[in-house]
Amino acid sequence: MSASAATPASTPAAMPASTVGGTPPAGSCPVINYDIMSPRPVLSAVREMAELREASPVYWNSFGTGFWMLTRYEECREAYQTPEIFGSDSVIVLDPNPGYRWIPTNVAPPEHSRYRQILNRPFSPRTVTGTTPRMRELCNRTIDTFLDRGGCEFVADFAAVYPTRVFLSIMGLPEDDDMLFVEWVDTIFDAFSDPEGQARTMTAMTAMTEYFVSVVADRRATLRDPETDFVSYVMTERYEDRPLRDDEILQMCVVLVLAGLDTVKSQLSYSFHHLATTPEHRRRVATEPAVVPTAVEEFLRAFPIIQDGRKVTRDVDFHGCPMKKGDMVLLTLGAAMRDPRTFPDPERVDLDRTANRHISFAAGPHRCLGSHLARAEMAVALQEWHRRIPDYRLAGDEPVVERGGSAGLVALPLAWERS
Amino acid sequence: MTAEPTTQERFTVEIMVDPARCTGHGRCYSLAPAVFDADDDGFCLPRGVTFVVAADREETARLGARSCPEGAITVVTAE
Ligand code: HEM
Ligand code: SF4
């Protein structure tokens, strides 16, 4: 990440665009300097972003290397659904010129849809439904490791481990490798908020890539059952009229790890923080498992963990803001998913919310590949946890802290009565 | 079936799923399985054609439409 932490945090809001060095003219758009990186007390970011949303639908934010911010639902969805203008050459606003091109994340239509045609099947609702019994088993085995202690650090002991085990099972990789992945992912994502972390990120990325290099070589030598082994499956699929190359398969594997583990962990951490601090919702989830699917959707809406980026492909006037080719745009989902123009009573977490058309899994062609899997993982976690630990509370006196951009809780100590 | 087509039409709703917009969020067939189905990749079926369901499913169809994050579903009440 090339975040320049040097930008003074004291830049006054709404200063004239012409005085902001090196930034594009913001037209009628307000200019701010809003920090999307620093950790802060839990749920600060959604509150801050809500204030921004009500004051303006679009901003120029001079934080880091500078980027536009869309704060409302319709504008975010429009950007997602217009990939020819809001491109995916970079999806991280603080890193406009990445040295990689990930499949499928950074690929544009029509190539993108050819890759997705291959990738959709192993992550389809039907495939996911078939793995739910196994998910339950892995969830319960994770709970077994701390149940009798009467407490755990939820993020490290549960939220990091259980999705990793499910992921390895879906991919057909050995379950004993779970702690390798937990550590790689922790290292990579911790380093995002630590300027000194780049070297550690590189080491972890290299180790993970080497891991998949040997998996790919192994499956090239002896193909396994494509129904249960992801790498064997993609090896038997075709991109138009050719098989996939090893480098493409490698990229897909790495992207799946980066997109599929820390996300579920972060989403679970907010969901369980909410439940630990909201007794009536905790009771409902524990006594009424049928509410879980709508609760999952509501947690996704109320606590969006991804503030997504897009890179403008040509000069365009977007709702009065003069965007230039190459500018980065933040789709501020933390603001947009609580937009009262779309969601009635948006600040209320409503487990029965109907017609919840949140786009926390994005919209448009890059709609989260793992959305059906993530939903199932969350539903299973909520059901199994509350079956076995129906009542619990925040433990310890330390304030709960979230990463910048509401990208998950740093830690969540929980405690319960031992039976 | 003895009902005349004209009578039948009055008791149906037309539904259309825009194939260019549907990206497979799966909200429609999860919430309104009586109206929408899924293909093997998790995209809505049918899409790209207008189809008709009995009017007593209109509310269900509309719930599906309102829940679609892409705004891909149109529900039309027949005249
Ligand atoms: C609650 C958990 C999750 C959330 C909130 C989430 C959210 C998102 C979002 C917003 C995007 C769009 C990114 C962009 O286009 O810039 C995305 C893409 C993606 N997600 Fe997820 N995700 C989650 C879990 C997962 C899981 C479990 C997997 C797979 C194992 C996964 C795999 C992917 C992949 C491969 C993409 C790239 C899709 C593409 O570019 O076509 N995600 N996700
Ligand atoms: S909810 Fe919308 S995008 Fe999702 S499958 Fe149904 S029609 Fe397609």
Image (cartoon, coloured by chain):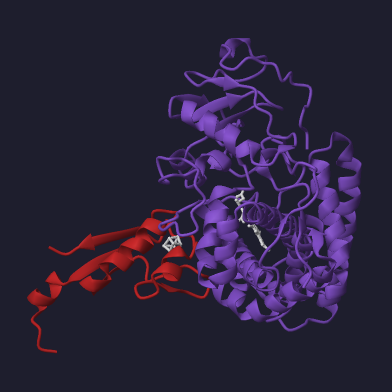
Chain colours: A purple, B red
Visible residue check, residue A285: yes
Q: Nearer the viewer, residue B55 or A202?
A: B55
Q: Residue at x 80, y 43 (%)?
A: A398
* Relative to A390, A144 lies left or right: right
Q: Image height check: is A2 above or below B26?
A: above
Q: Quadrant of the C terminus of chain B?
A: bottom left
Q: Image height check: is A310 above or below A321?
A: below
Q: Residue at x 55, y 17 (%)?
A: A25
Q: Residue at x 50, y 58 (%)?
A: A351
User: How many labels sit on residues?
Assistant: 0
Point out the quarter of the image occupied by ligand 1.
Answer: bottom right
Visible residue check, residue B44: no
- In the rendered image, residue A414, in percent from the top left (x then y), is placed at 76, 56
Q: Quadrant of the N terminus of chain B?
A: bottom left
Q: Quadrant of residue A168?
A: bottom right
- In the rendered image, residue A47, in percent from the top left (x then y), is placed at 58, 35
